[in-house]
Image: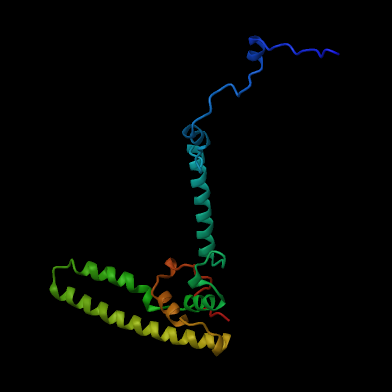
Amino acid sequence: MSKTPSTPAPNDADAVQNPSGKGRPTPSRAEREAANKRPLVADTKEAKARARADLAAQREKARVGMAAGDQRYLPARDQGPQRKFVRDWVDSGWHLGEAVMPAMILVILATFVPVPEVQFYSFVALWAFIFFVIGDMIITSISVKRAAKAKFGAERVEKGLGWYAAMRTIQMRFLRLPKPQVKRGQRPA
């Protein structure tokens, strides 16, 4: 019979050197969730300032692109070759609607004059001017639709070109967006 060597019994010193567990208590669920929590967006002042600066740069780029008439930055109502044609058609002429705001300012100033006749006739003149502006809008609408039918074909003309042209005529030229691309008197081809 052979004797197998017996393994020595572990003593307390070996147990301290080789712990059988992880050596610390299991973290609670609240501790684990707190350790995993991170903000989705960086919360530093520098990151916020950088994000604001990036957003401002994007907005400025879009504003400049829209003012220049770049198709990528135009809203849906201004996109397309027919809308560009209408913008150029309206911008190439003189329209009474451009003077509506200055006329209204003059009427407001006339109301400060203590003479009732001046106040009354200024309102009458303003209403007469507004009727002429409406007539100019109708004439522009009809002529733009006729020119668009001649250029793009009667069956391919988009709806709403006349209204689009009429609304552009009552904006002062320097406030129009997209900015005018043609000079006055230079009709689009």
Which residue is the extreme one toward the right?
1
Which residue is the extreme one toward the front?
1
Image point (48%, 42%), residue name: 48
Image point (48%, 84%), residue name: 144
Q: Nearer the viewer, residue 94 or 27?
A: 27
User: In this image, 128 relative to 32: left or right?
Assistant: left
Task: Give the image quarter of residue 142.
Answer: bottom left
User: In this image, 22 relative to 144: left or right?
Assistant: right
Task: Say if 110 sits above or below 31 in the image.
Answer: below
Q: Nearer the viewer, residue 149 or 134?
A: 149
Percent x, y of residue 2: 85, 13
Image point (43%, 83%), residue name: 140
Question: Which color mode does the image show?
Answer: rainbow
Percent x, y of residue 170: 38, 75
- In which quadrant will I find the C terminus? bottom right
User: In this image, 35 relative to 12: left or right?
Assistant: left
Task: Give the image quarter of residue 85.
Answer: bottom right
Q: Nearer the viewer, residue 13 or 124?
A: 13
Task: Say if 3 sits above or below 38 in the image.
Answer: above
Give the number of marks. 0
- In which quadrant will I find the N terminus? top right
User: In this image, 20 relative to 117: left or right?
Assistant: right
Task: Say if 154 sits above or below 163 in the image.
Answer: below
Percent x, y of residue 9: 70, 11
Percent x, y of residue 86: 50, 78
